[in-house]
Image (cartoon, rainbow, N blue to C red):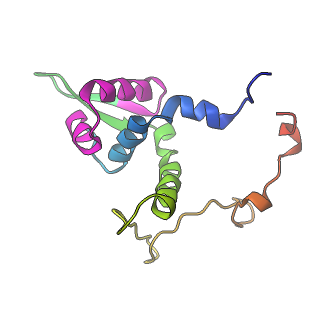
Amino acid sequence: MAPRTCSVANALEVVGERWSLLALREVFFGNTRFDQIAANTGASRDVLAARLKKLVTAGVLEKHQYSDHPPRHEYHLTDSGRALHNVLLMLKEWGDAYVTQGPLPLVYEHSCGHVLEPRVVCAHCGEEATLESLSRAPESAAS
């Protein structure tokens, strides 16, 4: 039996590794230089270089040289990379609720003035997308 074809599995091929997600976190925080990303993630330089290369190859990040001597690079989000922002917010929310013990290391405040509590909602009706509110669309039922 063949494994299920799935966009989650496809996405994990690109970003489903710890150092990839932590590197993206750092770029979202504005830490775009290799040394900054390495220092804030704790990844070894060779592992981080491989993950950044994979993210660049996949079109999630763009690599820009900012120094010639010695050659130094920084990384910028592409549209594909920026689209992962909400994924990281939801992963953080899950970690806050089910993994992190003690005071939360980072709390976001939304522009409305309240602490951010991210949710996935339907773009058409605005209702929260819960397990109970979802069903497969007829054109994808065979998957």
* Image quadrant where one finds the N terminus: top right
Compare residues 53 and 18 and report the one nearer the observer. Answer: 18
Residue 61 placement (x, y as % from top left): 41, 33
| Drawn side of residue 41 relative to residue 96, left or right | left
- In the image, taking residue 55 as reference, residue 37 lies left or right, namely left
Q: Residue sitting at 83 percent across and 46 percent down?
A: 136
Vertical placement of residue 139 versus 112, above or below: above
Residue 74 sits above or below residue 119 on the image: above
- Pinpoint residue 91: horizontal percent, then vertical percent: 50, 52
**Placement of the C terminus among the 4 image quadrants:** top right
Q: Residue furthest bottom?
A: 113
Q: Residue at x 21, y 41 (%)?
A: 39
Q: Any magenta on residue 46?
A: yes
Q: Which residues are magenta?
A: 33-62
In the rendered image, residue 113 lying in the magenta stretch gets the answer: no
Q: Position of residue 142 (x, y in %)?
A: 87, 34
Query: How far across and how far down the image is residue 48, in percent?
Result: 32, 30
Side (left or right) of 82 relative to 37? right
Tell me which residue sits at (48%, 50%) in the image. Answer: 88
